[in-house]
Image: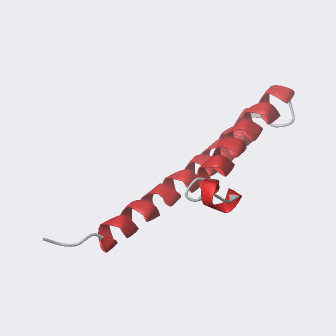
Amino acid sequence: MTLHGILAGRKTYILAALGILTAACGYLDGDLDAGQALQALLAALTAATIRHGVTTEIQKTNSPQP
């Protein structure tokens, strides 16, 4: 199995997790204030949420209707 195959469907979530980790580290290191860290955190969560919503809707569309 290739790396692309292993990461299929997970890349967005991995990047979102890294974004959350980066926001936390930036805040704890003092590079980001609380507002900036919260903004980065929400951006990462938004990306993951949108990705999940799109995947769910595609699955609904592709499933056979009774």
Report the side of 29 relative to 18 (left or right): right
Structure colour scheme: secondary structure
- Return the residue found at the far left: 66
The percent coordinates of residue 59 (x first, y second) are 36, 65
- Identify which residue, 39 or 23, lies in the foreground: 23
- Identify which residue, 64 or 33, lies in the foreground: 64
Q: In the rendered image, which quarter contains the N terminus? A: bottom right
Residue at the image point whose x is 28% and y is 69% from the top: 63
Residue 19, above or below 8 = above
Residue 59, above or below 21 = below
Residue at the image point whose x is 50% and y is 52% from the top: 49
- Identify which residue, 34 or 25, lies in the foreground: 25
Residue 2, above or below 31 = below
Residue at the image point whose x is 68% and y is 40% from the top: 20
Residue at the image point whose x is 47% and y is 56% from the top: 52
Answer with the quarter of the image where residue 58 lies.
bottom left
Q: In the rendered image, which quarter contains the C terminus? A: bottom left
- Return the residue found at the far top: 28
The percent coordinates of residue 2 (x first, y second) are 68, 60
Report the side of 14 relative to 57 (left or right): right
The percent coordinates of residue 9 (x first, y second) are 55, 57
The percent coordinates of residue 17 (x first, y second) are 65, 42
Tally of numbered tags = 0
Residue 29, above or below 36 = above
Answer with the quarter of the image where residue 62 lies.
bottom left
